[in-house]
Amino acid sequence: MEIKWLNKKNNNKFIVFFNGWGMDEKIVSNLLFEDYDVLTFFDYRNIEKIQIDLSDYKEKYLIAWSMGVYVCNFFRDEFKNFDKFIAINGTQKPIDNDYGIPVEIYNMTIERFNEQSCKKFIRKISPKLNTEEYCRRTIEELKEELISIRDLKIKDYLKFNKAFVSLKDRIIPAKNQINYWNQENIKITELDSNHYIFDNFKTWSELL
């Protein structure tokens, strides 16, 4: 697991961003920080608890994308008192026949994962992304992250306020996402977009 400050300027407002599988900070490099400090979590191998002092911030928000929508719940105690929680193209049951990626497809992805399937996966996230740039980690590392997410045990869940769902999502079926958030009674914002949505926004605050 890696944690990195994208912006730390002693602002009064704070965003923690839980990234998707296989990603790093480049995926959101186009978003302007404005008056927000932003911390990101990614590379979900060896997930472990952290200690971070956020007491100086007057406003605190959690944004999670893809598999990050599930992983962030592992840190529920650290972030449960935030002002708002936003999910983007993910659910709290990400490996599930009704609410996430079908179980057989996820396990088959792990079993057959190689360089070519990595590039195919990135193209499914968005045809705009450079496959070479996002498949630079070793195949074994990326596979380990898939397994780590699958085997992560969550007991208590955060309560999200809003969920963005892309109707053209080729990673987590939009129908399954909508099913999940509807049964959780969470407001859904539908987008005519792929799994990757950040090129539709200019600032972090637009996601809140």
Image (cartoon, grey):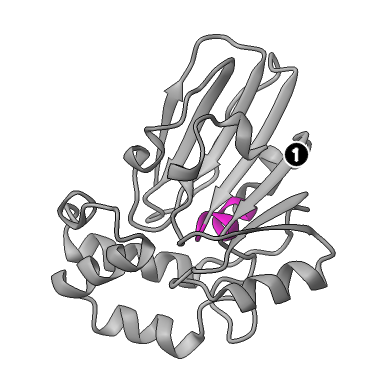
Q: Would you say the magenta stretch is mainly helix, strand or loop?
A: helix
74 or 109, which is in the foreground? Answer: 109
Residue found at the very far right of the displayed protein: 185
Residue 106 is situated, as x and y percent measured from the top left of the image, at 42, 80
Residue at the spot of label 1 = 84
Residue found at the very far top of the displayed protein: 10
- The amino acid beneath tag 1 is Lys
Say above or below: 52 vs 201.
above
* Tag 1 secondary structure: strand
Left or right position of 12 against 186? left
27 or 192, which is in the foreground? Answer: 192
Residue found at the very far bottom of the displayed protein: 104
State the extent of the magenta-drawn residues as a range: 66-73
Question: Does the magenta run of residues contain 98?
Answer: no
118 or 191, which is in the foreground? Answer: 191
Q: Residue at x 55, y 17 (%)?
A: 34
Q: Residue at x 63, y 78 (%)?
A: 175
Q: How many marks?
A: 1
Residue 156 figure quarter: bottom right
Which quadrant: the C terminus?
top right
Left or right position of 29 against 208? left
Q: Residue at x 63, y 53 (%)?
A: 87
Left or right position of 165 against 203? right
Residue found at the very far front of the displayed protein: 192
Residue 135 is situated, as x and y percent measured from the top left of the image, at 20, 57
Packing grade of label 1 (10 A; few <14, some 14-19, many >=20) is: some
Residue 157 is situated, as x and y percent measured from the top left of the image, at 73, 58
Residue 39 is situated, as x and y percent measured from the top left of the image, at 50, 30
Say above or below: 119 vs 83.
below
Q: Residue at x 52, y 27 (%)?
A: 38
Question: Does the magenta run of residues contain 71?
Answer: yes
